[in-house]
Amino acid sequence: MSNANAYITSSCIIRRQTVVKNGARIFEGTGEGLPEFLRSLYDRFSGQYPKFHKMDLLSKLGWAATEILLQDVPMEAYAPEDTGVILANTSGSLDTDEKYFDTVKEIASPALFVYTLPNIVIGEISIRHKFKGENAFFITETFDIPFIAGYVRQLLDAGIIQAAVCGWVEQYHDGYEAALYLVEKQPRGAAVPFTAEETEKLYR
């Protein structure tokens, strides 16, 4: 078991038209569909990033959750290779896969094909924030918090990364949920120890 310090310094949970950051509800949608809800998050928390509009829904969800997670966090203090991105979900990129398959019947869509791997969301996040550290995307039946926490702790303990954006980004048709955590070796703000138990508390 690791004895090294690691802390959750920020968290963002998005589900059921609601955004909760660090345990506080900060945004509620108006009952619109997922594309409109994600656009409202972009308008509220991001600003000018034209590439957002070309992303598939899974990437938009993970990208928007990361924008909110890292808002007001000085990530430029880390070298690009010091921040990793470790994510998981249960549906992979199946929603986009199905949409792409539909286009193959006539003219295959290169714009959709680009997003037929779930780890593309990591690429979109990394491009936006200039992260070049370790990254991985896992497919699990449910959000396996002990597994993700253990994997990230190994990377931190080995000195492979100094910080990580990690968690769950799931989207299939109208169903969606994001639960992201910023983990760092040094505490800031209302940080809590990075354990599976504390991660679970923030996820509820």
Image: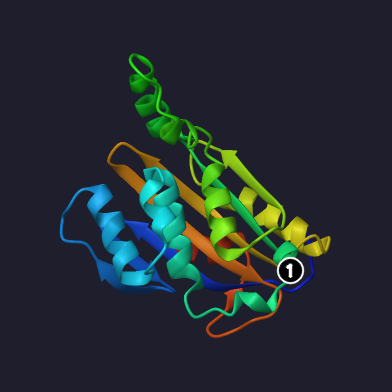
Residue at horizontal 60%, vertical 84%?
188
Q: Residue furthest left?
A: 31
Residue 145's spot in the image, x, y percent?
A: 56, 52
Quarter-of-image position of residue 12: bottom left
8 above or below 170? below
Q: Horizontally, is 181 left or right of 174 in the view?
A: right
Q: Is residue 131 visible?
A: yes
Left or right, 132 with reference to 137 = right
Expressed as whole percent of the image width and height from the top left, the position of residue 54 reads: 39, 47
Tell me the element at label 1: loop
Judged from this view, the residue extending furthest toward the bottom is 189
Residue type beneath disc 1: Gln
Residue under the image location 59 percent in, 40 percent down:
138
Q: Nearer the viewer, residue 111 or 22?
A: 111
Q: Look at the picture and state if 44 lies above or below 123.
A: below
Choose top left, top right, bottom left or bottom right for residue 80: bottom right
Q: Quadrant of residue 164?
A: bottom right
The residue at the far right in this view is: 158
Indicate whether 159 appears above or below 73: above
Task: Give the image's coloring scheme.
Answer: rainbow
Mark 1 closeness class: few <14, some 14–19, many ≥20 residues within 10 Å: many
Instruction: Locate the N terminus by quadrant.
Output: bottom right
Quadrant for the C terminus, please.
Answer: bottom left
The residue at the point 35 percent across, 46 percent down is: 176
Whether residue 204 is visible: no
Q: Position of residue 20 (x, y in %)?
A: 36, 68
Residue drawn at point x = 31 percent, y = 55 percent: 38
**In this rendering, position of residue 187 left or right of residue 124:** right
Residue where numbered disc 1 is placed: 162
Could you tell me residue 118's position as x and y percent? 52, 39
